[in-house]
Amino acid sequence: MTYENFLATLTQATPPPLTPQLQALWLCKNNQWEAAHNIAQDLHTTAGSWIHALLHLIEGDTSNAAYWFHLAKKPARTIKEIDQEWHTIARALCDQ
């Protein structure tokens, strides 16, 4: 799925068939933090850790977010960078 196609799905009532990583991002963007977190917890990959980091950043738990960014081998981000980081992750996952 292209990044642009993924963005177009965000206005749908439910997510289309997506990889677990993109489903977590879709849920995150649609204010379903807990459902997104439940998926991210089961993603034992670098991408899963990156999404998990973003979710804890959204939650405001910056120290936990920093831990997950470290596991993802990504620089820690600040709360001000949440939207930018969401798009960075989405682009990276759509490019795979």
Image: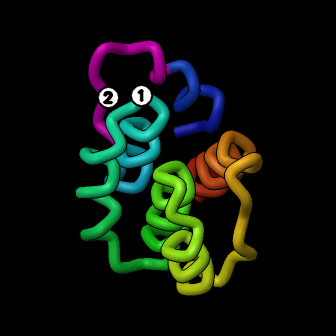
Q: Looking at the figure, which quarter contains the C terminus?
A: bottom right
On screen, residue 72 above or below 90: below
Labelled disc at residue 5: none
Q: Main secondary structure of the magenta part?
A: loop
Numbered range of the magenta stretch = 9-18
Q: How is the image coloured?
A: rainbow
Q: Residue at x 41, y 55 (%)?
A: 21
Q: In front: 89, or 83? A: 83
Residue density around tag 1, few if under 14, some if 14–19, many if 20 or more, within 10 Å: some
Q: Residue at x 54, y 82 (%)?
A: 67
Q: x and y percent of residue 23 in the render? A: 36, 44
Q: Amino acid at mark 2?
A: Pro
Question: Can residue 6 be spotted in the picture?
Answer: yes
Residue topped by disc 1: 30
The secondary element bearing badge 2 is classed as loop
> Quadrant of residue 44 in the image?
bottom left
Q: Residue at x 24, y 57 (%)?
A: 38
Q: x and y percent of residue 48 in the render? A: 43, 68
Residue topped by disc 2: 15
On screen, residue 70 above or below 35: below
Q: x and y percent of residue 42 in the render? A: 25, 69
The reply to whether dot 2 and dot 1 touch (C-beta < 8 Å) is yes
Q: x and y percent of residue 84 in the render? A: 74, 44
Tell me: 60 left or right of 38.
Answer: right
